[in-house]
Amino acid sequence: MANILLGVSSGIAAYKSVDLMRILQRSGHDVRVVMTENATHFIGPETLAALSGHPVGIDVFGEQNAPGFDHLDFARFADVMLICPASANTVAALTAGFADGLLTTSALAFDGPLVLAPAMNTKMWLHPATQANLATLTSRGVHIIAPAVGVLADGDIGVGRLPELDVIGAELERILTHFRPLSGVSVLITGGGTREPIDAVRYVGNRSSGKMAWALADEAARRGAAVTVIAANVELPRRSGITYIDAPTAHEMQAACVAHAADAAVILMAAAVADYRPVGQVAGKIDKSRATAMQIALERTSDILSELGAARRPGQVLVGFAAEAGDQGRVRAREKRIRKQVDLVVHNDISVAGIGFGSDENIITIIGPDAQERTYPRASKAFCAQAILDAAAMMLTHDAEDGRP
């Protein structure tokens, strides 16, 4: 799953952007659209907005007629930018570095892989200026998907026709595979909070929402990983392209982790697993009218992280999480990393109100071996997921350099 910025420039082939978007979405990608003003004469932005689920960018000045930073927002969003169709004018503008509209401004601000699918009349395609522009763009690392030969809009037959959309989709996937650092890497993530039954109605649980795990899964998938999420009572939207396994209790979480951990290259244990569970679930519902007080006997659950730490294979990266408060909590997180035999521990600072469980933000410290630590101030869980996966990917790189599988 990747974030794709689809640029639509002027040309009759612009109408095909609707079907192209659907192809990309069926592959699990999130697609946003920016288009030139002239392209709106061929395909309405309302159609693209409705199908993408995002506003379509057209004007540098936006709807409020005031300068903004939409071009930077589009550029930051994208893992890859695909301009399809790319007109001769857009090709020339990109070659010269013009920023004369939102599409070209976004392209100039984007520092990832840029892909062009040109479509134009044969004479325009073969013109020396167009060919020179394409050669310049290619020398800068821009990927050009060559047009096909066929019947053109004006009835001529020749080169310049937009390639078949499945060809464009396949080429984009190839480019994404090359640029996604976790392509082919299996990542296992646990998330949410387990619920340990007292009776058929009541349970012992915690406040974990699963938002951190969901952010990790989205980011790992965006980087090309094959992602499996073991979810404990998470009520969040599930993304296509990610495998989800429900494990409501600590026992079910332990069984699922043992079943899937051996095949994972990276394991991120973000779930809040109950440390204790009631001894023996009561059938039906406890009748509260029989007593003014109730005692519940508890027993320890399995220490899943320790089990995985003891059993992990060489080259496997294991990341634990520690929801602790303040500096003393960070000390306990350091001790946990050593005690549980894991590569990294992410200390979630829950001493600050408004972050942590149920929030979209967090304050984390990533604790690694040899007293390596990095603290990130209050930030979105999406940003935290990027930092955590950056650190985990570095551990994978180090394993490869050490010659370990």
Image (spheres, helix red, strand yellow):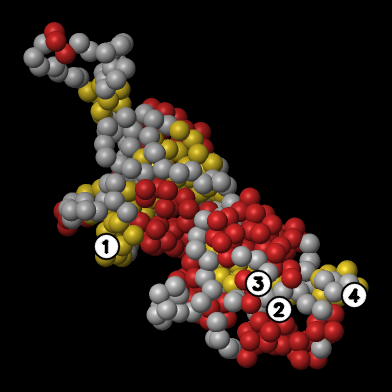
Q: Position of residue 25 (x, y in %)?
A: 61, 53
Q: Position of residue 227 (x, y in %)?
A: 53, 47
The disc, 4 or 1, on the residue closer to the chain's N-terminal end is 4
Q: Which residue is mark 1?
A: 378
Most extreme residue toward the right, as rendered? 157
Mark 1 neighbour density, 10 Å: few (under 14) some (14–19) many (20 or more): some
Residue at (67, 54) in percent of width and height? 23
Quadrant of the image occupied by residue 64: bottom left
Q: Which residue is mark 4?
A: 156
The amino acid on which the numbered mark 3 sits, given as a three-letter code, is His
> Separation of disc 4 and disc 3 at Cα?
22 Å
The amino acid on which the numbered mark 4 sits, given as a three-letter code, is Asp
Left or right: where 109 falls relative to 193 = right
Residue at (30, 22) in percent of width and height? 197
Left or right: where 225 falls relative to 257 = right
Q: Which residue is mark 3?
A: 41
In this rendering, is residue 168 above or below 146? above
Q: Give residue 313's mark.
A: none
Tell which tag, 4 or 1, sits nearer the viewer.
4
Q: Position of residue 356 (x, y in %)?
A: 26, 51
The amino acid on which the numbered mark 1 sits, given as a three-letter code, is Arg
The amino acid on which the numbered mark 2 sits, given as a three-letter code, is Ser
Tell which tag, 2 or 4, sits nearer the viewer.
4
The disc, 2 or 1, on the residue closer to the chain's N-terminal end is 2
The disc, 2 or 3, on the residue closer to the chain's N-terminal end is 3
